[in-house]
Structure formats: structure tokens, C-alpha cells
């Protein structure tokens, strides 16, 4: 398929986004940027959040995990449909967000959710929480962004002679252009548009492959099942993929990465009232389960399609003696993150390949634009305190916001280049692992505030506890197999990290009753 043809569709799609951004950002101000003037439609927010939550990682990486370790005994957290265990946990976590955290945020009329920590504990805890969000979201968003940029580079732009760094800079400039003025007010609409195209790409690819393999839904499930791809529950308690670990871990991943994340909550609290925001969250939770199942089904179909077209599994042994499974097609290993783009752009008809590219870039922008906006909001409000500084004019606040927005775009570029240097076959596992370290302290801080009446000191001891907990959890995770008779810690690490943080805060806290 001509890379110029694919590139022209990328440019056309971006022009469409700019048109939407221009229309929605008219007469916008700082409140439009930060919380959409609290006038967002809950149905648009719910639908758009699908794209933000799934991102390019789900679009590309989740299908690749289905057959990633098929036929091997490697201990992988997501074999076959094993990722659906995490999705069940996500579903449960959304109810906690809807009925515990959202009422808290609305009752306190928050613009930044970390203002809760300030009102509950003071400035040190407040800035510590905001700092952990900034670290978490910066790394997570750039990992997602890197994956999609990498695929566009490898399958389209490299053939045009465009270097990776140029691709990265141009895409970041695109995101800057349509989020610069409108912020959340614009993103609510652009995310809705992009989620539509992403889901269109998913459905079209499933329908085409099923038709090509002469499957209906039942026969497709049977064929995928015969290959062992549909197994969901992992009953090996020592494995990272043990079902209780995955479900509990998934639940707390949702609480941390959605309920305690300014990017996700920024859109929710932009809805007019609590009731509509809760309807948004519950509607979104039901849809996200169905969509993730479709991505897993697509993964099974992609592996069947590749095997049907001459690809073969091979056991490979690295220089260190570790064994892994490879799926070889045309002399290349296409297992993992490269499976979907390889099949879509080299084996499927041109029209389907174009829809894949549109779906891919639709998955790219919602996760990146929302993260850039949320990080700008958090840094301006939580770290710089521009809303609390009454001496600043509206124009001065806007100038500060734009400077911070540009600065984070540059930071994104640096992290993308770091991920390019590191490299990884499956990004989704890396993101979930990292979330366990960075969102754990946030979980500990918020739960300590909600479930106790104790006060924390106005000192850096709070920050020290929040930094120490992930370090202790890292050593626990690395050595768990040796220390606990083969038991391995998976994504439940976030919960463990939160508990360690909670206990550390309990040690340094005071018994005095709250005075507010």
C-alpha cells in the first residue's frame, strides 16, 4: 500500500480535528480549558472517555497479547483472553469511582481533584499528590504515544524517508494546535469524534477477517477457542496472571488511573451535575467491557488469519537462555504489538488498511491530548497555584497556561525518544507495571483522607513516605518469587503500594480531630 496514500489520510484527519477545535474553542477562557465551564454533555463525555481509556495501546497491544505466548509455558500475565480478568476488575472499580470519589469531588466543587488533599491535609500533601500524578501521567501518556508513533513510522513514514524524531515533533505540534485554546471544552468533542473512528476501525477489521475466513460469530469463537486463545481464568496462584490478582489489581488500577487521575476526572467534573457524571461513569464502564472483549476477539482472529496465510510459531532461545514464542511471517516476528499493523497493512485490502490507519490515529490523539491538557491544568493549579493567586490577571493566567502547555509538549518529546531507545515488544504490560509504582502513593493518600480522621504533619515527611513506598514495593516485587516460594506479584502491586503508603502515613500522623 502506498505510504503517500496513507499519509494523505493522516493529514486529512488532522485537518478535520482542527476544524472541530476551531469551532469549539471560540470565546473560550481558562475555565473552558480546565473544566469546560462545567457544561459538558454527559453522553459525549462517556463516549469520548472510551477513546481516552483504550488509546493506541489497547488498539494495537491488546490484540497482540492473545497469542503472544500460545503453546509455551512462559509465565505471562496475559495469555489468550487473560487480559479480560483485568477488564472485570476495571468494571468493579468504576462503581467505586462513581459512588465514592465523584460525590466527594462535586461536594467540594473541585477544579483539580488534588485540591482535596490540600483541604484535608495541607499544602505538602497536596503538592505531593499532584507531583505523583504528573509523573504517572507523563510516563503513561508518552508510552502510549510512543507506540502509535512507532507504528506510523515503521509502516508509513520510514518509506518516505522521514526520521522518527521529525514524526514525533510533527504529531506533538498537531496535538498542540487543537488543544492550545479550548482545552477540555474542545477535547470533549474531538474525543467523541476519535472514539467513533477507532471503534469503526475495530468493527470493520473484525467483520472483514470473519468474512474472509468464512466465520460467523459462533464459528469464530469456536475456531479461536480451538487454538486455546479464549481461555480467560488463570488458576495458578503463583503466576502473575492469577485471576484474583488480575481482578483485584484491575479494580485498583481503575481507582488509581481513573478516579485519582486528573485527566480522567477533569472530564467527569466538567459535566453539569453529579447525577449526570455518575450516569456517564456507569455507561462508560459497561461499554468498556464490551469493547475490550471485541479487541481480544480481534486478536484471536488476527492470529488465525496470519496462520492461515503462512505464518508459523517458532520457539526461540535468547543469549541468556530464556525461551520465547515467535510468530514468523515473511521472515519477521510479528507477535505482540506488530501483529495488527502487519496484517492490516500488508495482508488486508487497501480500504481496510486505510480504516486501520484512521482507527490507529484516532486511538492516538484522545490519550495524548487529554494527558497534555490535564498535566497543564494540574501544574498550573496545583503546583503554580494560578487560581489561588488573586494578583494575576486573566491574561497573565492564560500566558502562564500556554507556557506550561508548550513545556509539557517538549517533555513528551524527550520521553518518547527515551522509549524509542529502550524499545519494548508489548507496551501494555509496562504501563500496568509502572502504574503500580506511581499511583500507589495517590491511592494511599486519598484512602487515608477518606477512611481516617487523623491529620498529617505539614512537613516533607509526607513526601518521604510517598517516595519510600514504591521503592520498598520494587524490592518486594523483584524478590517475591524467591522470598515467597514461587509466588509472584502482578498488577496487584498498586494495592500493595497503596497499603504500604497508608501504613507509613499512619505512623507519621497525629490523633487530633479535624477542625474544618
Image: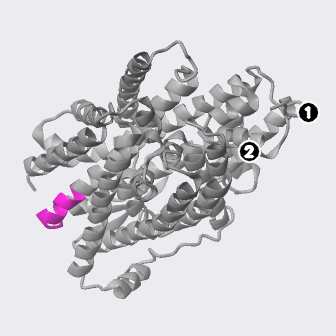
Residue drawn at the location 37% of the way across and 40% of the way down: 369
Label 1 element class = loop
Between 501 and 157, which is closer to the camera in this rendering?
Answer: 501
Give the colouring mode of the picture: one colour
Task: Give the tally of numbered discs.
Answer: 2
> Relative to 152, does residue 514 appear above or below in the rendering?
above
Mark 2 touches mark 1? (CB < 8 Å): no
* Relative image position of residue 385 (x, y in whole percent): 56, 21
- Is residue 423 something one can see in this rendering? no
The image quarter containing residue 465 is top right
Does 162 lie within the magenta span?
no
Between 105 and 330, which is closer to the camera in this rendering?
Answer: 105
Task: Give the mark, 2 or 1, whose residue is nearer the N terminus.
Answer: 2
The image quarter containing residue 182 is top left
For mark 1, what is the residue?
511
* Relative image position of residue 105 (x, y in whole percent): 63, 44
Residue sitting at the far right: 511
- Is residue 258 something one can see in this rendering? yes
> Relative to 28, does residue 244 appear above or below in the rendering?
below
Give me the C-alpha separation between circle 2 and circle 1: 17 Å
> Would you call the spot at circle 1 few (<14 residues within 10 Å), some (14-19), or many (20 or more)?
few
Between 50 and 231, which is closer to the camera in this rendering?
Answer: 50
Q: Main secondary structure of the magenta part?
A: helix
* Relative image position of residue 353 (x, y in whole percent): 18, 61
Q: Where is the N terminus found, in terms of image quarters?
A: bottom left
For mark 2, what is the residue?
447
- Magenta stretch: give its range: 346-357
Residue drawn at the location 57% of the way across and 60% of the way down: 90
> Would you call the spot at circle 2 few (<14 residues within 10 Å), some (14-19), or many (20 or more)?
some
Amino acid at each position: 500500500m502506498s505510504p503517500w496514500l496513507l499519509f494523505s489520510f493522516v493529514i486529512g484527519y488532522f485537518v478535520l480535528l482542527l476544524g472541530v477545535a476551531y469551532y469549539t474553542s471560540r470565546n473560550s477562557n481558562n475555565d473552558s480549558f480546565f473544566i469546560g465551564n462545567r457544561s459538558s454533555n454527559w453522553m459525549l463525555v462517556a463516549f469520548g472517555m472510551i477513546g481516552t481509556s483504550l488509546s493506541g495501546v489497547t488498539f494495537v497491544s491488546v490484540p497482540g497479547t492473545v497469542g503472544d505466548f500460545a503453546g509455551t509455558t512462559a509465565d505471562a500475565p496475559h495469555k489468550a483472553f487473560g487480559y479480560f480478568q483485568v477488564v472485570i476488575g476495571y468494571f468493579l472499580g468504576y462503581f467505586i469511582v462513581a459512588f465514592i470519589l465523584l460525590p466527594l469531588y462535586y461536594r467540594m466543587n473541585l477544579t483539580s481533584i488534588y485540591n482535596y488533599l490540600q483541604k484535608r491535609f495541607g499544602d505538602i500533601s497536596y503538592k505531593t499528590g499532584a507531583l505523583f500524578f504528573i509523573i504517572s501521567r507523563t510516563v503513561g501518556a508518552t508510552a502510549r504515544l510512543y507506540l502509535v508513533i512507532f507504528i506510523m513510522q515503521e509502516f508509513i513514514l520510514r518509506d518516505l524517508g522521514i526520521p522518527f524524531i521529525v514524526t514525533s515533533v510533527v504529531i506533538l505540534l498537531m496535538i498542540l494546535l487543537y488543544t492550545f485554546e479550548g482545552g477540555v471544552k474542545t477535547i470533549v468533542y474531538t474525543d467523541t469524534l476519535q472514539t467513533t473512528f477507532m471503534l469503526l476501525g475495530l468493527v470493520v477489521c473484525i467483520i472483514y477477517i470473519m468474512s474472509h475466513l468464512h466465520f460467523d460469530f459462533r464459528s469464530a469463537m469456536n475456531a479461536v477457542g480451538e487454538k486455546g486463545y479464549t481461555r480467560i481464568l488463570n488458576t495458578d496462584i503463583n503466576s502473575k496472571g492469577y485471576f484474583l490478582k488480575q481482578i483485584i489489581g484491575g479494580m485498583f488500577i481503575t481507582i488509581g488511573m481513573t478516579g485519582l487521575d486528573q485527566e480522567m476526572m477533569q472530564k467527569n467534573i466538567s459535566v453539569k451535575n453529579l447525577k449526570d457524571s455518575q450516569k456517564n461513569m456507569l455507561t462508560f464502564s459497561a461499554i468498556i467491557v464490551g469493547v475490550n472483549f471485541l479487541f481480544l476477539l480481534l486478536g484471536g482472529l488476527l492470529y488465525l488469519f496470519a496462520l492461515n496465510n503462512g505464518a508459523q510459531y517458532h520457539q526461540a532461545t535468547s543469549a541468556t537462555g530464556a525461551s520465547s514464542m515467535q510468530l514468523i511471517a515473511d521472515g519477521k516476528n510479528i507477535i505482540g504489538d506488530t501483529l495488527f499493523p502487519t496484517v492490516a497493512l500488508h495482508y488486508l485490502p487497501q480500504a481496510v488498511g486505510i480504516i486501520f490507519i484512521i482507527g490507529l490515529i484516532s486511538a492516538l490523539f484522545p490519550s495524548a491530548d487529554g494527558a497534555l491538557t490535564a498535566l497543564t491544568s494540574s501544574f498550573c493549579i496545583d503546583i503554580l497555584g494560578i487560581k489561588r493567586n488573586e494578583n494575576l490577571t486573566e491574561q497573565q493566567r492564560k500566558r502562564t497556561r500556554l507556557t506550561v502547555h508548550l513545556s509539557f509538549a517538549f517533555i513528551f518529546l524527550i520521553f518518547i525518544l527515551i522509549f524509542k531507545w529502550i524499545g519494548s515488544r508489548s507496551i501494555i504490560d509496562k504501563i500496568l507495571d509502572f502504574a503500580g509504582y506511581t499511583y500507589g502513593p495517590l491511592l494511599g493518600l486519598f484512602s487515608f483522607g477518606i477512611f481516617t480522621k487523623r491529620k498529617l504533619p505539614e512537613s516533607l515527611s509526607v513526601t518521604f513516605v510517598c517516595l519510600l513506598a514504591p521503592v520498598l514495593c520494587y524490592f518486594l516485587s523483584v524478590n517475591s518469587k524467591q522470598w515467597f516460594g514461587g509466588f509472584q506479584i502482578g498488577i496487584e502491586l498498586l494495592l500493595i503500594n497503596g497499603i504500604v503508603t497508608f501504613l507509613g502515613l499512619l505512623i507519621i500522623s497525629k490523633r487530633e480531630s479535624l477542625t474544618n
